[in-house]
Amino acid sequence: MIETIVESVSHLQVPVKNLEESTEWYIGNLGFKVHWKRPDNKMTILTLPSGPSIFLCETELHQGMMSVVIGFEAVDIRKLLTDLQSKGVQIGEIRENRGVVEGEILGMDFDFFDPSGNMLVVHATSKFVE
């Protein structure tokens, strides 16, 4: 058996086209707080009350991804969907039923996009973690 050396995910690094715009987007739409900003204004570290940090890194090499780069849980996913839609956030596929595990219906999830084209996903909070 292999010994587990890595204990947790410390951060996710997300490429962005415009650091200022993306920082404001994550703060205004998802409630992140700025933890630290690099002096050359090319990277900002954002945090939530729990979970890994997100490092937004401005780069000219950014290419919008069509796979999820960050997954979130929401206690009121329908309210979040309504809030994001009212703010004009691009919403992707909305899935009403993610399936059933041990008799529990996992509920809905949906894809949405940040201003740099990164795909994000949010799902209803569940006792099951994949």
Image (tube, rainbow, N blue to C red):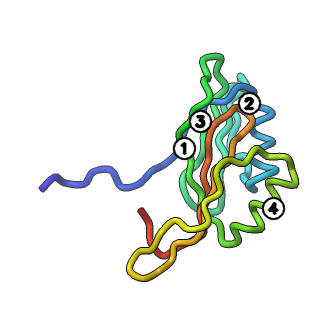
Q: Dot 2 surroundings within 10 Å: few (below 14), some, or many (20 or more)?
A: many
x and y, in percent, of residue 123 in the image? 59, 63
Q: Which residue is mark 1?
A: 68
Question: In which quarter of the view is residue 107 placed?
Answer: bottom right
x and y, in percent, of residue 43 in the image? 66, 31
Q: What amino acid type is highlighted by mark number 4?
A: Thr
Q: Is label 2 in a helix, a strand or a loop?
A: helix
x and y, in percent, of residue 129 in the image? 44, 66
Q: Is residue 36 above or below residue 77?
A: above
How many angstroms separate mark 3 from mark 1 (CA)? 11 Å
Q: Which residue is mark 3?
A: 14
Q: Residue furthest top?
A: 60
Q: What amino acid type is highlighted by mark number 2?
A: Leu
- N-term mark: 4 or 1: 1
Depth check, mark 1 against mark 2: the one in front is 1
- N-term mark: 1 or 2: 2
Depth check, mark 3 against mark 1: the one in front is 1
Q: Dot 1 surroundings within 10 Å: few (below 14), some, or many (20 or more)?
A: few
Please state, as top left, top right, bottom left or bottom right, where the N terminus lies in the image.
Answer: bottom left
How many angstroms separate mark 3 from mark 4 (CA)? 25 Å
Please state, as top left, top right, bottom left or bottom right, where the C terminus lies in the image.
Answer: bottom left
Q: Which residue is mark 2?
A: 19
